[in-house]
Amino acid sequence: MSVGEEIRADQDQPQKSLGTSAARNLATTTKSAPQMQEISSRWLLRMLPWVNVQGGTYRVNRRLSYSVGDGRVTFVKTGDRVQVIPAELGELPALRTYEDQEVLGELAQRCQQREFAPGEVLASFGSQAEEVYLLAHGRIEKIGTGPYGDDAVLGVLADGAYFGEQAITDPEAIWEYTARAVTACTVLALPRRDIDQVAERSESLHEHLQQLRAIPEQRTNKFGEKEIDLAAGHTGEQAIPGTYVDYDAAPREYELSVAQTVLRIHTRVADLYNQPMNQTEQQLRLTVEALKERQEHELVNNREFGLLHNCEYDQRLQPHDGVPSPDDLDELLSRRRGTKLLLAHPRAVSAIGRELNKRGLVPETIDVGGNRIPTWRGVPIFPCNKIPVTEARTTSIIAMRTGEAEQGVVGLQQAGIPDEIEPSLSVRFMGISEQAIMSYLVTTYYSAAVLVPDALGVLENVEIGRWR
C-alpha cells in the first residue's frame, strides 16, 4: 500500500476523540501584551540629564564674546554652475553683521568658480593671501609643518567651509598653511581686489570694514570672551589691575517644544473588551512609546534645538580617511573636557568595530543598566538609530559633555503639568463624542540646551559602507 493510500485510509476511519479545533472553543488562550517594532533603546533620553524648566523657557547666560562669525556657506547649483547665496556671505567673519543685500549680491556675482583635482594645491604656506575660498563640494586638507619639519595635517574642510577670510581685512595677510585637495573640489574664489573695488563704490561696506578693524584689538581669551585682567607672580607694591566679567546682552532662550496626538477609543471597545487587558491602558502605553520615539528624533534632528544642528562649526570634524578610525575618535574627544558619551547610528558602531579590528584593538565594555556598551578611551558609545544615514552611506557621530554643573548639554522639561503621568508628559481626557468615541490628548514637552559651545561635538560624513 502506498503512502497516499494509507493517508486516505486513516481519513476514512471514524473520529474516536474530541478534535483540537473544537476543544479550543472551551479553552482560554494566553495572550501577550501588544508588541511594537518602533520601540528602540532610546539611550539619549535615558542618559541626558533633565532640567526642570519654569515658564516653558530656559535662558543660557554666557560671558560676552567678540567672535565674529563661524558659520557654513550655502550654495545653489544649476547644471555644472555653482553660485553662492548672497545672504550666505554673511557667514564670513568680516561680513557677519553686514546687511546690505544689494552689495552682498554684487560680491556673490564676483565669485569665480574653480575646479581642483585630487592632490592639487589651492594655496601655499607663506604666500600672499589675496583670495577668500568658499568650498562648494569636496574635501580639502590644511597642511602645516610638524615639530620635526615634516608635513602634518592640521584639519580637514568639507562642503560649506571657507578659508582665507583674513584676506578681507588684512592686506598683508599670508597663508599660514597649505590647502590641498583630497578629492575633486568645486571652489568659489572671491579676490580681495574685487572686494576693494566694491567697497570703493559702497560707502556702507567701506565703513563696515573700517569699523571691523577695531574688533581684533579687544582683549579676549582663546574662546573670544572678554579677558579678565589678572596679575600673577608679582612682588612688592605693584598695582593690581581691576576687572569685571561682562555678560552677553542677548542670551539665547530655549522654548519647550511639544509632541501631541489625540488618542480615540470607542466606548464599546473599552466597556466590553477589557479583559484580561485594559484596552485604554494598552492604547495609551503604545501611544506614549511612539511619542518618546518622536521626542528623541527631535532632540537629534530638530533644526531649532536638535544636537546635529546646534553644534558649532569649529566643533565639527571630518574623518581623515572617511571611515571612523580610532584617530578620528581621539580627535573628537580631544575637543572637549570630560566627554560623557558618544552617540552613533548602530551601523556606525559596527563601522567603528571594523576599524578597531583592523588595528587589532579590542574595545572595553561597561555595564549600563544590564547592557554591555562598548567604549573608546573609557567613553561609552551608545547606539542611536535617530541619527540619519544618507544615501551615500555616510552618517555622524555625536560627542557630548552633559550636566549643568559641567557646563554641558542638558535636556529640558517642565514637571508638574496638569494630568501628568510622567515628568512633562500628560494624558488629558477630552470627552466623549456623539459617536460614543472617547478622546485623550497625549502631550509631551521637551527641548535640549548646549550651555557652552565645546560641550557638543560632531564627527561628520563618516563612511559606514567601506569593508576594506
Image: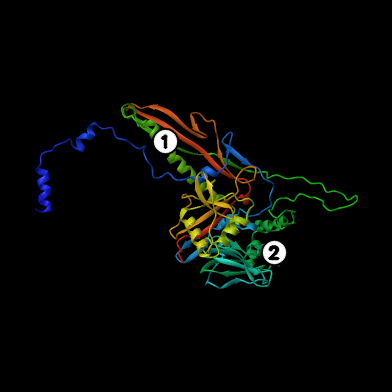
| Residue 56 visible in the snapshot | yes
Q: Name the residue under label 1.
A: 285
Of the residues shown, which amino acid type is indicated by label 1? Arg
Of the residues shown, which amino acid type is indicated by label 2? Asp
User: In front here: 218 or 12?
Assistant: 12
- For marks 1 and 2, give the one nearer the viewer: 1
Give the total of numbered labels.
2
The x and y percentages for residue 162 are 59, 62
Occupied quadrant, residue 467? bottom left
Residue 401 position (above or below residue 31)? below
Q: What element carries label 1?
A: helix
The x and y percentages for residue 2 are 10, 54
The residue at the point 45 percent across, 40 percent down is: 291
Graded by Cα atoms within 10 Å as few (under 14), some (14 to 19) or many (20 or more), the crowding at tag 2 reads few
Q: Name the residue under label 2.
A: 170
The residue at the point 59 percent across, 49 percent down is: 340
